[in-house]
Structures are given as structure tokens and as C-alpha cells.
Image: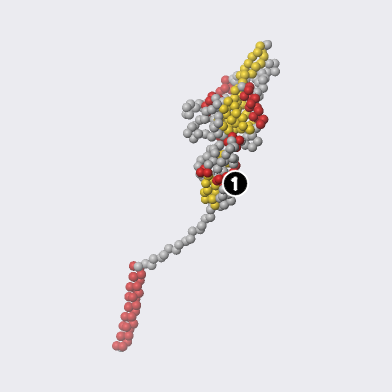
Amino acid sequence: MGSVNIRQISIIGGALLVAGGAFIWMRSQSSNPTIVQPVAVAEAKVETVNVLVAKRDMVVGERISPSSLGWEAYTPTSAATPGFFLQSKNPNAIQEFSNGIVRQAMVKGEPVLASKIVDVDAKTGAMAALLTPGMRAVSFPISPETAVAGFVLPDDRVDIILTREVQYTSNGQSQSRVVSAAILENVRVLAIDQSVTQDKDKTTLPGGVATVELSATDAEKVRLAHKLGDLSLILRGYADAGGATFASTGTDVMSQRTGVGQSGEPKPATTTPTMQQASQAIPTAVKVYRGGQ
């Protein structure tokens, strides 16, 4: 019996020692946790291409300098437009466009398109470069009161109004009347005097001569209209400035018999509306600007 008890006690003691050692080891592991080292993840490399862009805002008619253009990194998907100039394919593009003239306004960071720059020699005039192929430049005198007080600027769209005096005979006596109507609409303004760009420090551009872009036939019409009477400009809003120039379909103010009936008498005036018609008419609002306000 004595030997058995000693044997059992030995086994129990060994088990206690093993359990105690395991307990001490677990305590040591919990007090000193294993530090997991972060695994570096390689970032995917995005390939880019250098695209020719405007380095500053540029207005119509401005002569381009080398500092006006530069290269900027674009992703291949955003530079997929065929009209973009890539440095890999056009390494000398900045030098080639250094003496060009801006045909369409550009903002800083905008990719350069060939259609927005006229590549001309330094000796070539800016006006010839600004003209649309097939069009002509024609000039005529204006005054502040006939050019929206100087608010008509290069590259604006205007209507050209002819105001003239028409002679006719009534009851054997010579009579006259003043008529006015648009002869051309949606006309592009090229310059005011010799300015083809707007000064950034000025809100208006008063001048004595307006130069506009017209077809050869319309240019002849304007020259004739200038001999017949006074020409005025009516500024069109941006919403109405799209499309090509067109001739007005109203009264032919360039005809000598404008406003005159078949018998030589003035055409009767429009019938005065009744009170009911007047009350149903939509009122016209007139907004007056003074001093830039």
C-alpha cells in the first residue's frame, strides 16, 4: 500500500507541475502579445501622358507666347480625344504655336485644340487670322449711342440696324419720313477700332469704328447701307448668339419705297388697338443701365 500511494502521489504531483507550467506560460504570453508586422501592399502604378494645355486664361485675338502653353499629365483615358496634342507625338508644339493667335477663348488648364489657335507667322495680321474661312471683314463708323454705350465687345454677336430718311411724293408735294429696321442679324464683331481683345481692366470698349465678319454678299449690303443712312448695333444675349448670320425678313429698309404705298402715299399706320385688346396685351419691360449699373 505504501508504494502505491507514493506512486499515485508522484503522478498527481507531476500533473500539477505540468498544469502550473502551462498556466505560467499562458500568463506570460498574454502579458507580451505577439506584434503582427504590417504587410506592405504595392500600389498600382497609373500611367499618364503629357498633354498640351493653356497655362493661363486667354482671350480671342491674343498673341500666344511660349509661357502661355505647357505640358500637364493626363491619364490615357482622359487624353483619348484625337484633337489633343501629346508631348510624345508633338514635342515641339509649344514652339510651333508661340506666334499663334487665339481664335476661341481658353481657360487655364484647358487642353489646347487646333481649332482654337490660328498658327500664323509673326508678320501676319491678327484680323486675317481671326476671320472664318470664306468670310470677309467690313468696317463702318459707330458712336456710343449706336453701339450700346460701349458694351459691344469683340466676339460678341449683334444685329445691324439701318436708320434712313425716305423721300416720296404726296399730293404733288415732296415728303419724307424716317424708317429703321434690321438688315442683318447675329453678326459676329471682330474688333472695335483696332482692338481685337477686351482690356481686363475695362468693362466697356468705346470706339468710333466697328469691324464685323460677313459673307461677301452681306459685306456689300452693309457698305451700301452705310451710304443710305446711319448704322447701329444691337447687342444679342449669349442665349441668342448661336448659329450663322442671316438677313432680316421684315421691311426692306434699303428700298426707296419703304413705308410708301402704291400710289406714292405713306402706308396707313397700324390700327389702334381697342381697350380690351390693350388690356390683354403683355406689357414690355425696359431695363436701363447707367454708369455700368
Residue 216: percent from the left, percent from the top? 66, 31
Name the residue at the right extreme: 262
Using the image, determine if residue 18 lies above or below residue 278. Answer: below
Using the image, determine if residue 104 lies above or below residue 11. Answer: above
Residue name at image x 32 percent, y 85 percent? 7
Residue 189: percent from the left, percent from the top? 58, 32
Which quadrant is the N terminus positioned in?
bottom left
In the image, 130 versus 95, the foreground residue is 95
The residue singled out by tag 1 in the image is 83
Residue name at image x 65 percent, y 20 percent? 259
The residue carrying pointer 1 sits among few (fewer than 14), some (14 to 19) or many (20 or more) residues within 10 Å by Cα, namely few
In the image, 258 versus 187, the foreground residue is 187
Name the residue at the left extreme: 2
Residue name at image x 55 percent, y 31 percent? 194
User: What's the colour scheme?
Assistant: secondary structure
Number of numbered discs: 1
Judged left or right of residue 82, residue 70 is: left
Residue name at image x 58 percent, y 25 percent? 141
Residue 101: percent from the left, percent from the top? 57, 39
Type of the residue with mark 1:
Gly
Residue 92: percent from the left, percent from the top? 56, 48
Using the image, determine if residue 68 lies above or below residue 32. Answer: above
